[in-house]
Image: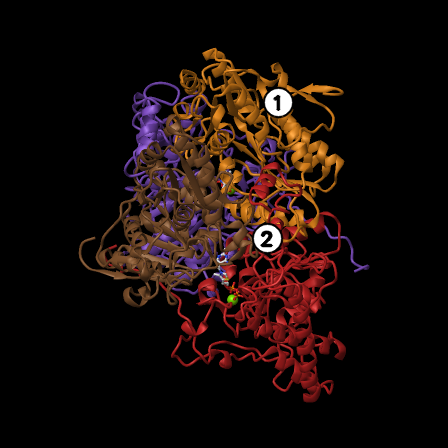
Chain colours: A red, B purple, C orange, D brown
Amino acid sequence: MPDSKPLKLRIPEPGCRPGDQPDFSDFVIPRAGEARRPDVDAPAADIRDMAFSIVRVINKKGEAVGPWADALDADALRDGLRHMMTLRIFDERMLTAQRQGKTSFYMQHLGEEAVSCAFRMALEDGDMNFPTYRQAGLLIAGDYPLVDMMNQIYSNSKDPLKGRQLPIMYSSKEHGFFTISGNLGTQYIQAVGWAMASAIAGDTRIASAWIGDGATAESDFYSAMVFASTYNAPVILNIVNNQWAISTFQGFARGNAVTFAERGHGFGIPSLRVDGNDYLAVHAVAKWAAERARSGHGPTLIEHVTYRAGGHSTSDDPSAYRAKDEVSAWPLGDPIDRLKRHLIAIGEWSEERHTQAQAEIADTVRKAQKEAEKNGTLGSGSHPSPSAMFDDVYAEMPPHLRAQRQAGGH
Amino acid sequence: MPDSKPLKLRIPEPGCRPGDQPDFSDFVIPRAGEARRPDVDAPAADIRDMAFSIVRVINKKGEAVGPWADALDADALRDGLRHMMTLRIFDERMLTAQRQGKTSFYMQHLGEEAVSCAFRMALEDGDMNFPTYRQAGLLIAGDYPLVDMMNQIYSNSKDPLKGRQLPIMYSSKEHGFFTISGNLGTQYIQAVGWAMASAIAGDTRIASAWIGDGATAESDFYSAMVFASTYNAPVILNIVNNQWAISTFQGFARGNAVTFAERGHGFGIPSLRVDGNDYLAVHAVAKWAAERARSGHGPTLIEHVTYRAGGHSTSDDPSAYRAKDEVSAWPLGDPIDRLKRHLIAIGEWSEERHTQAQAEIADTVRKAQKEAEKNGTLGSGSHPSPSAMFDDVYAEMPPHLRAQRQAGGH
Amino acid sequence: MSGSTTRMTMIEAIRTAHDLAMERDDKVVVFGEDVGYFGGVFRCTAGLQKKYGSHRCFDAPINESGIVGAAIGMSTYGLKPVVEIQFADYVYPAYDQIVSEAARMRHRSGGQFTCPMVIRMPTGGGIFGGQTHSQSPEALFTHVSGLKVVVPSSPYDAKGLLLSAIDDPDPVIFLEPKRLYNGPFDGHHDRPVTPWKNHPLGEVPDGYETIPLGKAAIRREGSEVTILAYGTMVYVAEAAAKETGIDAEIIDLRTLLPLDIEAITESVKKTGRCVVIHEATRTSGFGAELSATVQEACFYHLEAPVLRVTGWDTPYPHAQEWAYFPGPDRVGRALREVMED
Amino acid sequence: MSGSTTRMTMIEAIRTAHDLAMERDDKVVVFGEDVGYFGGVFRCTAGLQKKYGSHRCFDAPINESGIVGAAIGMSTYGLKPVVEIQFADYVYPAYDQIVSEAARMRHRSGGQFTCPMVIRMPTGGGIFGGQTHSQSPEALFTHVSGLKVVVPSSPYDAKGLLLSAIDDPDPVIFLEPKRLYNGPFDGHHDRPVTPWKNHPLGEVPDGYETIPLGKAAIRREGSEVTILAYGTMVYVAEAAAKETGIDAEIIDLRTLLPLDIEAITESVKKTGRCVVIHEATRTSGFGAELSATVQEACFYHLEAPVLRVTGWDTPYPHAQEWAYFPGPDRVGRALREVMED
Ligand SMILES: Cc1ncc(C[n+]2csc(CCOP(=O)(O)OP(=O)(O)O)c2C)c(N)n1
Ligand SMILES: Cc1ncc(C[n+]2csc(CCOP(=O)(O)OP(=O)(O)O)c2C)c(N)n1
Ligand SMILES: [Mg+2]
Ligand SMILES: [Mg+2]
């Protein structure tokens, strides 16, 4: 091909980097209330457009508008606000605890609180979530004790995971929260398998899978899509698109596609996007997807559009790779502010009540922390015994492990 | 959820099984000439419909019709016919050789000859194919010596792969034919990597990846789509949908999607389907995709719709899992018949010439076989030496391998 | 063996074990590539879909990590999946799910989530399958705590061990030496194979009789040297002992993880010599673990170094299959060598 | 060491090796998760994108098999990819591409297609990383013929070995003990770590100076016992020798595959005793291969069994990290034990 020009590799570039002015002007945001609400039995092909739109309910004035604005009464909304506020305060305290050497590591949810908190309220007890490390709202909204979360974070003597797991890698079967893996993506196909099992058993329980924008590139994401599509598994496939995967912007995982929800096309899986900073929208879409799954209509893919306002983890400093003002430029706002404004707009909340709630929650979290620290922290106090390391490798300890435990003097 | 009905697992079922009447009535086949021909720079979103249609050129009367009917003159068409006939006769003789114990294993192309033979003619020398085990037409149409193919199949003393590989797992760098892997799917992402390398190097050569309908379910297929999409790699992504993956019909890999080409949606990769039994259609679509890749428009996904008319391999007997008459009911006909009819229709061929060509080709293949058998077969005659097993594990043989070779007496 | 027995091949034994387990416990589900309607390319699951319905036995997309990942999810739900990987050579895509997930689930969740599941796969060479239908990847699993690894060598063992594996509360890798499916193979590829119906270990109890995991079997008592073997190599060991006339004690390990160290130690302390054999490549093969363990436990009883006879550190070749395969000659040479010392 | 040198950390040494290789050969390309703009979560590739452009050093989607698979394709094209797996714990999804493809490419294609590439990954524990930031998977690679496996233990070695790895015509697994990135660590976690700038092996030649693959280094000469170690454990061995006062010869293997059997044999024949140490789980760890090899080669020189001191057969725990880590105490105990015999 003498007349061909040399080929070139395309390397995706984010809108801005440190030093640049943040610019979200090519991020198309439909108005709240604009997205239609299809029937739960709508085939994937009929709702194709919804993978390119965003379901939004709370508008700029704080009103809940459109066909997805229905489900929750004022008590439920206040619960939701309390859950999100609890998660945010919990995060703050644990970040401090990590800095104080009380634990080795922490990951926060700043800006993403609505996603897991609202979602949890759309599920039934008995349903199973297969989360990543950034959905602790599923536990908090599900009334899992804060003390137990902290016990895990501190790897202390009351850690339900016996000191084995990295902080925040919670597990609670009882609360429908699958044991978090440090390996990205693995849980996604497991969720589909769990949902298949529920269908095989003739059960009514459904599964929810969780993954970040970056981790959608992992193969297990694909396995999950293939199996969910083929066996029509009763599972909700959630993608939390918080724009970043550590230092890598979402364009590397998304590639030439316009949205992550689009990935569902080509599997015949109904796929939609939701404003992840809009508690009402997340809840409504989750409810819809759960009803689909439970009534035999199979999987739904949901892209939660949100923004990771904090660092990736306590090991990360985002100022090295993203513009300082990107957080404030993010156009979907803050989930707590938005729900608060909505509650005030409908006359069910006030600045005073908010300040008071803030203080109460801070107190609750502080008390939980005190309680947890009685059981020790990673830095000091009591710990699970080394011998706990040898338990649960198998149901029954085989002779060679017993010998090793003895050799170790444990 | 007391009012929920028990969930059920959906297990896909093929249209027919042994004992059933084959029925392809819900297989929608557009008329030849019907599919439009987009510009090579058309964005994926603009040609979405083409993933649900089928590009077809040769109609029932043997005429070449529509916007994709242009490229080839009569000589090229006769070459194409000869390539396909050669492949079919080659297959027949090698199947017999396997039955005679001259080799351990064989895989044929019956009914799928057009796909690889036509495709090869749309590439340039220097382009690289990453094939599966069912694209020997790429070698035959690329004038790779039949004797070398047979030497490999026989694992004889002139086997270019030194007896190491399973029969038909050819490799020819010179002929743009990547070493076949026994592990399904692995080559797909490698093809994308090769294409990326060509782009990094500022080269003009492109890659073609090949995969079967069943193997699209493998994770490497997804990795390839993600990387091709993200880096806009100059690669043609071919899916050969021959309806079966050993005993498993294509519904298990495809799931709830309507076509395999659909998989390209959601990656922003232009995707289309082509009548894989129509030499002209395959050639035209391949040319179009190659031009796209070479002019910087990135990857194209092509689903070749065809039918595996034979058994999966010499280890397989399809009568155990598919209806006997499915082959004859297959509505897209036989690729050799169809091209022959077209050549006759345009006055460039005749039954007599066909019979004569048949005899000539059979003779050529027979002669090649005689030649190859001089070098031995797996069953008898000379073989690569056992010491060849120790070569090429590394560029330079490390001491431990040298010691092992000596211990083995080789 | 109590009660009635039937002569059968290893394939039939495996099928029967599935059948009994599925009948006994409707939590047992079976799936994999070509496993459902067709009954598997080696026919190990033939008839199960018909008998138990397509929700208990079904085909899967060709995606090994998906198969294992889905099975993990099912097992944490409470089912007992038994999945087939069509050839052991194709298990690598599932390696992450096995190692990072199935093997660690119980531990990392403090016992809340567990993976009672079996991953079956045909292993080993000797069928001219070339490098991708011949591998023996057992050492890649024995390095992974949390897994059990089982290799049966006969219809009798295959049935009893598979029943135990399905019943086990932890994930079990079940490696089936495909060269043994139809008869014991001693490495003399130029001689006809005895079918199982003429071999005592082809006699299989009809009922639900298990063989415990973690227990080796002594296939031949002997006084001069201990041979540690499993799968196909058990018969190669027998042939080598016979041909050399060396009075070898042959231990069929049956379970590689957890290993029956007691049986091994007892034998080596008695014989004072040990030869370890397997088909997999040598470096970091399971033979390394056996050799290391034996010399740690029996150092003062050893009269000769523990020798390994294994596949070479090369891919499994096609034409040179019999030069690769560690047959009775190579094993015999090692036996003579340790006897000289 | 000819010419000028600079004091640097292991991270800087790795970065410098990349830089020199990229400068020398424009076929060298570098990519992986967070490797491009940011320069890697451990900063090993910082500055390379800026210097060589985003087509030579770039970020990748989070898909390890994709990263390795694409690198394989690139290497068969003729480039020399150097890819980073963010933690060795995340290499398993790429295992199939490494084992079935990169390792076998040259052999199966009769030498037509080759995979000159390097797969780098931080390995080992000691940073409270829990089970998924602490693993040492080397034995899973040493079992695979066609691969080379390298573990540097200092800035000096890291630079020289990485240059050799990039220049090697075959695929190299390059395991970087992350606990050593900023200073040698001897397992005394309660004591401050010496930074590399105060350690002689932190002195690194500025030029393109390679260290050959396949050659071990003697870190301490001794007469009583040979310790075989690599990576972090080299410093643990030094501490244990010092604390027990036993005159150990410490061999830093540097390359595990191909192994420098000559250096090992020579030393063990001299000392008559051998202790093998590593951080990975014990069963089927690389220590098994070392132990088996030593007793095969030096049986008649051994006065005590070859002992292994390793991580336990459990996942790498978080809170119990120091009970898991085979520190100087455990190594010391083994040294005393072999000396008693
Ligand atoms: C298999 C695997 N590869 C790489 C990593 C390292 N890693 C941890 S988090 C992360 C980024 C994930 O980004 P995303 O999926 O977008 O989730 P987010 O952190 O934004 O919630 C990476 C690369 C890992 N944990 N597992
Ligand atoms: C990783 C892997 N898994 C399973 C197999 C076994 N296997 C070989 S061919 C085949 C069916 C492939 O079907 P398809 O992709 O449709 O290709 P076709 O044979 O129809 O051309 C299977 C399951 C394999 N070779 N590699
Ligand atoms: Mg993210
Ligand atoms: Mg097919």
- Find disc 2 in the rendering and name its residue: A189
Q: Residues within 10 Å of mark 1 (few under 14, many from 20)?
A: many
Total numbered labels:
2
Percent across and percent down for residue C85 are 56, 38
Residue C9: image tag = 1
- Above or below residue D23? Residue D312 is above
Q: Quadrant of residue B354?
A: top left
Residue B111: image tag = none
> Hey, which residue is sitting farthest left in the picture?
D3
The residue positioned 59% from the left and 41% from the top of the image is: A401
Percent across and percent down for residue B163 are 35, 29
Percent across and percent down for residue B380 are 37, 18
Q: Amino acid at mark 2?
A: Ile
Q: Amino acid at mark 1?
A: Thr
Please indicate, yes or no, whether residue B52 appears anywhere in the rendered image.
no
Residue closer to the observer: C233 or B213: C233
Quarter of the picture holding the C terminus of chain D: top left
Q: Secondary structure at mark 2?
A: helix
Please indicate, yes or no, whether residue B96 appears anywhere in the rendered image.
yes
Chain letter behind tag 2: A
